[in-house]
Image: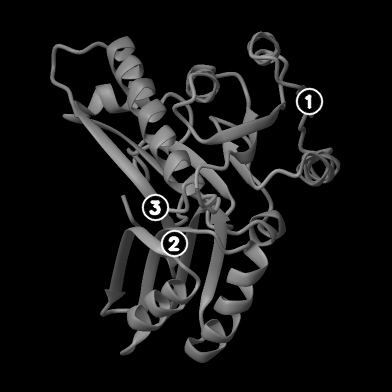
């Protein structure tokens, strides 16, 4: 009996200027390395003129062989690309303040194996959620932030990202603004969540403001963080309808639930390499 060669499921994502022959070249390269394509999605953006592709392939080829094969292809088509093993939990650092709903949801989803992340730590500018991190056996790092200590706090955060090997940072209702430099250095690697009333109802008590105005939709937006506050490329949004019978507490409860599921979907799609940046927009291969 012939021994069966062990295979690995790989995910290849790429973007490049759109043009003929890209899909053919990628599929041919994978076939030459014994690749069996199990999932493939592509999109050509007529506005930016760029092409985007996500391919999941089963192959016995090593990472080194695949990288060597993709490299000349990338040079030929001017590609930005990434190769990873399918299902590998992404090392993730969660940043929190006092609101617990997003933190609890993400940690529960990770523990129940529904979310492909490996939470390597929880960072809080307050200690309110330290017990939740302990319950899930996650290291908690208290990094207080004041107007005068913001540079030192951000330096400590950078050290934690480097020290934990975090590939993704999630602002799970972290109520501090990151510097432009921090956003640039980790572009496409920091995800935030907020209510979707913005730019209306800014500041404190947004749900009270919304209730006073009689809103009919409660929503949430998850996006990549940039130097433009709450204006980064959007990954996912969701809404729930409300009416005049809902109290302020009802709106808060509905809003928090919407934030939880919106953020969880954004984190999942990022961890599964389903989100590709297209300028100020995103391409999401669901």
Q: Which residue is mark 2?
A: 276
C-alpha separation, residue under disc 1 versus residue under disc 2: 31 Å
Q: Residue at x 46, y 37 (%)?
A: 193
Q: Residue at x 38, y 71 (%)?
A: 52
Pointer 3 with pointer 1, Cβ within 8 A: no
| Left or right of 197 on screen, residue 70 | right
Mark 3 or 2, closer to the camera: 2
The disc, 3 or 1, on the residue closer to the chain's N-terminal end is 1
Q: In the displayed image of the protein, which residue is found farthest to the left?
A: 244
C-alpha separation, residue under disc 3 versus residue under disc 2: 11 Å
Horizontal and vertical percent position of residue 242: 17, 22
Residue 121 position by quadrant: top right
**How does the figure colour the protein chain or chains?**
one colour
Q: Residue at x 35, y 18 (%)?
A: 252
**Label 1's element?**
strand
Mark 1 or 2, closer to the camera: 2
Q: Is residue 13 or residue 261 the one in the foreground?
A: 13
Mark 1 residue crowding within 10 angstroms, few (<14) / some (14–19) / many (20+): some
Q: Which residue is mark 3?
A: 234
The disc, 3 or 2, on the residue closer to the chain's N-terminal end is 3
Q: Which residue is mark 1?
A: 141
| Left or right of 260 on screen, residue 98 | right
Pointer 1 with pointer 2, Cβ within 8 A: no
- In the picture, the disc for residue 68 is none
| Left or right of 19 on screen, residue 231 | right
């Amino acid at each position: 009996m012939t021994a069966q060669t062990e295979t690995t499921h790989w995910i290849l994502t790429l973007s490049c200027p759109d043009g003929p022959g890209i899909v053919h070249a990628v599929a041919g390269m994978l076939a030459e390395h014994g690749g069996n394509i199990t999932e493939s999605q592509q999109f050509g953006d007529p506005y930016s003129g760029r092409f985007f592709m996500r391919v999941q392939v089963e192959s016995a080829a090593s990472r080194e062989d695949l990288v060597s094969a993709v490299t000349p292809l990338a040079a030929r088509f001017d590609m930005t690309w990434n190769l990873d093993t399918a299902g590998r939990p992404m090392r993730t650092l969660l940043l929190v303040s006092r609101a617990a709903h997003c933190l609890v949801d993400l940690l529960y989803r990770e523990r129940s194996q529904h979310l492909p992340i490996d939470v390597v730590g929880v960072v809080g500018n307050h200690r309110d959620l330290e017990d939740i991190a302990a319950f899930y056996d996650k290291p908690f790092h208290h990094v207080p932030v004041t107007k005068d200590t913001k540079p030192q706090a951000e330096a400590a955060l950078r050290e934690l990202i480097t020290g934990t090997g975090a590939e993704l940072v999630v602002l799970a209702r972290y109520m501090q603004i990151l510097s432009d430099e921090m956003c640039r250095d980790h572009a496409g690697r920091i995800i935030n969540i907020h209510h979707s009333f913005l730019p209306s109802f800014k500041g404190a008590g947004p749900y009270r403001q919304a209730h006073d105005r009689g809103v009919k939709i409660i929503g949430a937006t998850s996006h990549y963080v940039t130097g433009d506050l709450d204006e980064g490329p959007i990954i996912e949004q969701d809404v729930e309808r409300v009416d005049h019978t809902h109290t302020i507490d009802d709106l808060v409860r509905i809003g928090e639930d919407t934030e939880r599921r919106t953020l969880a979907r954004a984190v999942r799609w990022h961890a599964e390499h389903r989100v590709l940046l297209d300028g100020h927009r995103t391409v999401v291969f669901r």
